[in-house]
Amino acid sequence: MKKIALVFLVCCLAVACGGKKEVKQASPESRTATEAFALAETIKTAFIKKDTAALQRNSTDTGLKDITANKKPYDSVDIFFTPRWVEIEGSQLMVNIAWKSSWTVSGRRSEERGMAVFVMEGTPLRVSKILRANPFVASDK
């Protein structure tokens, strides 16, 4: 009886796992949103590493001014992004990102958070503006 139950279970398992299932292709909007999220992470990493060449490569002139608008010197910074949603309007993408940052200046640590809108455009995508609370600028606290 146990052998019959075991054989039946193995047969059911083989039938359930067998067969090829068609993989759905991602929509163009989904691929664009994924590219936008990856670009935001690239910009963040370049900012933390102070890699101006990567910042210039991945942003327009006005976007670079927004990213490098921080006039205060800092020892280190940690920034965490949580992408929320993407709006596609013609050739522009507006990527809404919740962020948290931790700045260390002269041994003193301050934490901030906010919501930013990264405006991206072009092919390949480049950051052209940062609206709302800029994650790359330390406040005067």
Image: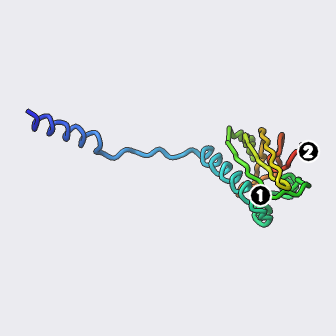
Residue at far front of view: 107
Left or right of 95 on screen, residue 105? right
Where 74 sits versus 135, above or below? below
For the residues marked 2 and 1, what is the alpha-carbon distance in whole angstroms?
19 Å
Q: If you read the primary sequence from the N terminus, does the residue marked by circle 2 or circle 1 appear first?
A: 1
Residue at far left of view: 1
The answer to whether residue 123 shows anywhere in this view is: no
Q: Residue at x 40, y 45 (%)?
A: 22
Reading the image, the residue beneath label 2 is 140
Where 51 sits versus 27, above or below? below
- Secondary structure at badge 2 equals loop
- What's the residue type where badge 2 is placed? Asp
Is the C terminus in the top left, top right, bottom left or bottom right quadrant? top right
Q: Return the residue nearer the eye: 70 or 65.
A: 70
Dot 1 crowding, Cα within 10 Å, few <14, some 14–19, many 20+:
some
Q: Residue at x 85, y 56 (%)?
A: 106
Q: Position of residue 112 (x, y in %)?
A: 79, 42
Left or right of 76 on screen, residue 39? left
Where 25 sits versus 68, above or below? above
Which quarter of the figure has residue 13?
Answer: top left
Q: Position of residue 86 (x, y in %)?
A: 69, 40
- Secondary structure at badge 1 equals helix
Q: Residue at x 44, y 46 (%)?
A: 23
Reading the image, the residue beneath label 1 is 47
